[in-house]
Amino acid sequence: MVWKTVGFVIWVLWAPSTFYSTTHGTKLIECTQERFYGIQNSGKTSFVYFGNKVNPTIRLFLEKFEKSAEALEDYGILVAKVNCSRVEVPKYCTGGDISKKVYLFRGGEILKIFAIDTVFDVDAIVAHVLFTVIFNEVKYVQTPAELLHIEKAAKGRADVVLAHVVALGIPEHRAVMETAFVYGAKYQFVLTTGGTVLEHLGVKDPASLPAGLWFLHCKAVAHRSEGCDRTALRRPLTTINIYTFLQLMEAPLVTEASVEPSQVRTVHSRLHTPLLFVFTQRETLDLDRNTALSLARRLRGQAGLVLLHRDNPAVNIPVEYNVAYRVPGEGSPVEYLTLKNLDEAVRIFQEQNPLEEEEEGEDEEEQHWSVLDILDDEVAESVYRDRDLELNFDLVPELTAETISTAVAGNGHTVVIFYTSWDAVSMAFMRSYLEVANMLKDVTGVQLARVDCGEWTDVCSNQNVSHFPTVKLFHPSELPQLYRGMLGTESLYRFIMLGREAVPLLLSNEDEVQSYLGGELYQRYAAFSPVTVLGLFSSSQDQGSALFGEAAKMLRGEVFMGVFTEEEAAKWAQNYAVKLPAMLVCRGPDSRIEAFTLQISGTEEMVSTIQRAVLDKFPELTVENLPAYLELGKPLLMLFVEEEDGKSEGIRRELQSLLGKGQLDSYLPCWIHLGRTPAGKAILESYLGSVPLLPVLLLSELGSGGEVFEFPPGKPMLADSILHWLSRVKRKEEQPAGVIADEKWAPPVPFYDFLAIMDKEVPGFATQRTPKSKDMFQEVEEKDLEGKVGPSPPQSDNCNYPLG
């Protein structure tokens, strides 16, 4: 790879009264409008920051950028700024949030838009910029299969450098990118962020390894059936250490010499690496060469190996010694040893490495960063990082305006994802969608398909698709079912499997009812719907029965529902002390069946009643079920536990006793298992500032600014004491332990206006677009017609999309 020349320009803005002035001699350049367009016309890569105000965050941001200019000079990268209050650059010096984003261009094309929180220090700047510039030269892998595929392609052609970093933007990521920038043509660089790849490499505890690097010796592999040998870097991931390591990988495995050990000079000496001398003589030369070669492979990267001919007259070595070693450093003595096997020689360098220990000690304090410091849109970052990994759409055909009707009519159940290829959430979810397609490939009558709404706007319009991604389950001659669950593999799989069943299930006798409420019928669907709902009506002509049937169709794929309309329905209702029409909710054969009298006037009310009824009265909160419980709008009485031991079980029984007596009706009692839901730790930290000793009981008022109360630590959590504490909170006699932060969850950059984008394809199509969006696209079109230099409308990797 020819050394890249990249123009890296950062445009920084300040209010006129406090505009930041750079010191004399800085590499940070202040640009004009002419300079900006000149750089874009030159075709160079530029990183551009626009704005017109200053605050402490931006002041710190500028300081880091100025320092990065010095660091990036060696890569031919320029760092610059512009003050939008003095210099007007159309499209980029307008808008309310221009100070929160940075544009990366190649010529007039936008490569990426960063939030300034992403490039928060010099390491993050260098790492993210180089990663973007050389993205096509650095492969990203998530599984051992992907790594083996790269190894297979590299055998006989090139060696592979595999790096692991726990997150992007950290110093180790920067070191890898700097090395890849220089050596990208010589080696195939591969990046991973952990998981099963580390286990494949033999790392016993992947979570304990924040960073690592391996050299895969694939170039010398003669036969495709052979594997690539691996050598691990045993020092911290710094640029110097990686450079040194790569040079050691190119050094000869064994060097032969016929002089005194103190006079031997090899590439290892220049690289401050120890030398191990193995002594040989004419009679055992062939055997000693094989031994030295085997030992050199085990010590590769840690020590150089010299096969020293002791029968040369110039060499005077006592016969009782068979090896010697010399540590780096001018004038270091040669230590002579008599070893019995190769393991003893290896232990010389593995048991203690003073240089390595010293460097690790220096880095120990630097590794106390938090993953929360790596600020970025994780979905967009993941999609951008994986863009070279091709998706296999063999099981998910693309549908068009001409084929969608035929596809739906030709299958019993057709699942369709409506997406856009430029939407990060769509493309991230697409991997889960393809996984589900693979899981269902042998299921008869189910076909997964896709529609790209960027290509087929009319199809998406006809299906009332207003957000991306949208998944619908189609049945011939029936209305499609909208998927409202989490964008994950398991949730979608359950929805499809449950959605295959016709609802409501018509039960004809009491035996079927018994089976449905905990017997064979229940077990058949328990994996997909652990809660079943049974409607009891006097006859099929009952108005409530029709409403229940409509509600069942609307909830198809979410809740499994049955209906019993025979004469015995009244007896079942009487057994549970309710009157017809009624509804029974079963949570399993070992749980008490809950009964409700239905007094419903409409389908929507019936749906809402069923959705509330299936919610647990004392739920374990998870990421998946939290939104449903928050919709109840009740204060959360949360018990945080670390394990289900006797103590936590006892507290739960105390809360359940209060719940059974109706004394907690104004609250939502719930519990969170931090082992199964690690996000609970973040909740505790945000509420209390730290994670206290568990179990802990909190009362949280919903909404921003709501107060959080902690049950007095050390006091037994008994029913009476809990009730007394809640009474004190209600009377405002308890001091809050914290307050829910009043944070705005707005995206760091503007939303895409997809309707306006569609309108460009089909003029007049998007009737709901806002005047602001219209003006934006008119401005772009006018500038394109005028031939002005400048990229197309900004597209952010940090966009968020409403999911329904």
Image: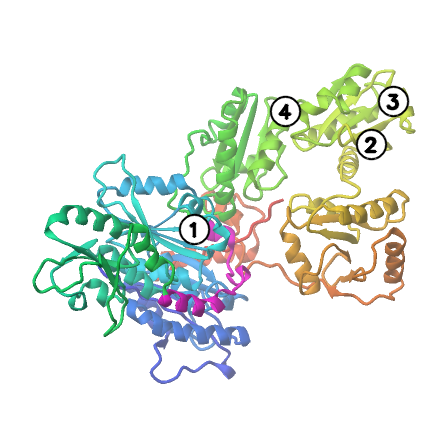
Q: Earlier in the sequence, mark 4 or mark 2?
A: 4
> Are there few (<14), some (14-19), or many (20+) residues within 10 Å of tag 1?
some
Does residue 395 appear in the picture of this structure? Answer: yes
Q: Residue at x 24, y 67 (%)?
A: 334
> Are there few (<14), some (14-19), or many (20+) residues within 10 Å of tag 2?
few
Regarding mark 4 in the picture, which secondary structure is present there?
loop
Q: Earlier in the sequence, mark 3 or mark 4?
A: 4
Q: Measuring from the top left, give residue 773's x and y in whole percent.
A: 53, 55
Q: Earlier in the sequence, mark 1 or mark 2?
A: 1
Q: Which mark is residue 592?
A: 2
Q: Chief secondary structure of the magenta span?
A: helix
Eye-nearest disc, 3 or 1:
3
Eye-nearest disc, 1 or 2:
2
> Are there few (<14), some (14-19), or many (20+) residues within 10 Å of tag 3?
some
Q: Earlier in the sequence, mark 4 or mark 1?
A: 1
Q: Earlier in the sequence, mark 3 or mark 2?
A: 3
Residue named by callout 3: 572
Residue at mark 4 to residue at mark 1: CA–CA distance: 38 Å
What residue occupies the far front of the structure in this picture?
320
What type is the residue that disc 4 sits on? Glu
Q: Residue at x 70, y 32 (%)?
A: 530
Q: Earlier in the sequence, mark 3 or mark 1?
A: 1
Quarter of the picture containing the N terminus is bottom left
Q: Quadrant of residue 127?
A: bottom left
Q: Is residue 707 left or right of residue 677?
A: right
What type is the residue that disc 3 sits on? Trp
Residue named by callout 1: 384
Q: Which residues are magenta?
A: 354-382
Residue named by callout 4: 478
Quarter of the picture containing the C terminus is top right
Regarding mark 2 in the picture, which secondary structure is present there?
loop
